Image (cartoon, rainbow, N blue to C red):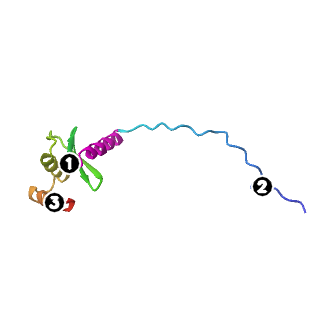
Amino acid sequence: MQKIETEADRPRPKPRWRPRKLRLELGAEDAAAIHDRRWFGEHPSRRYHARGGLVVRRCSGVHLRVADPEPVADNEADCETAWWRNAWPDLSPRIRDRLRRAARSLAR
C-alpha cells in the first residue's frame, strides 16, 4: 500500500522574515499617566493635583482627570473643589458637596 503525502507530512520551510524591533512612542495620554503616577508616588498623602489646565483625582489607584479652564492653586482643598465642580458641572453645589464629603469618608 502506498502512503499518500499530506500537508502535515511535508517539512515546513523556515520563515523568511525576522522579528523587527518595535519602536514604542509615548502619546500625550501615556506621558500624562506616567507623570501623574510619579507625582502621586512622590506625594502619597495627596488625593488631588492640578497641572496644565487639568485637575487629577487619585481614587483607588486610578487617576481621574478633568479639564479646568480656570487656574487652580496646587493645594488639596482648591484642587478638590475644582475637581468636583468640573467633573459634575450640572449638579447643584449642595449635591456636589455631599458627594465630595461621602467620597472623602470612603477614602479613609
Q: Is residue 55 magenta?
A: no
The residue lying at 77 percent from left, 55 percent from top is: 9
**Amino acid residing under circle 1:** Tyr
* Between discs 2 and 1, the one toward the N terminus: 2
* Between discs 3 and 1, the one toward the N terminus: 1
Using the image as rendered, state which of residue 104 and residue 98 is in the foreground: 104
Using the image as rendered, state which of residue 76 and residue 100 is in the foreground: 76
Element class at badge 2: loop
Using the image as rendered, state which of residue 40 and residue 98 is in the foreground: 40
Q: Quadrant of the C terminus?
A: bottom left
How far from the left and from the top, in percent, is residue 68?
18, 43
The residue lying at 78 percent from left, 56 percent from top is: 6
Label 2 vs label 1, nearer the camera: 1
For label 3, the residue is 99
**Amino acid residing under circle 3:** Leu
CA neighbours of label 1 inside 10 A, class few (<14), some (14 to 19), many (20+): many
Magenta stretch: give its range.
Answer: 28-45
Q: Which quadrant of the view contains residue 105? A: bottom left
How far from the left and from the top, in percent, is residue 104?
17, 58
Rounded to the nearest whole Å, what is the CA distance between mark 3 and mark 2?
A: 68 Å
For label 2, the residue is 9
CA neighbours of label 2 inside 10 A, class few (<14), some (14 to 19), many (20+): few
Q: Which quadrant of the view contains residue 69? A: top left
For label 1, the residue is 48
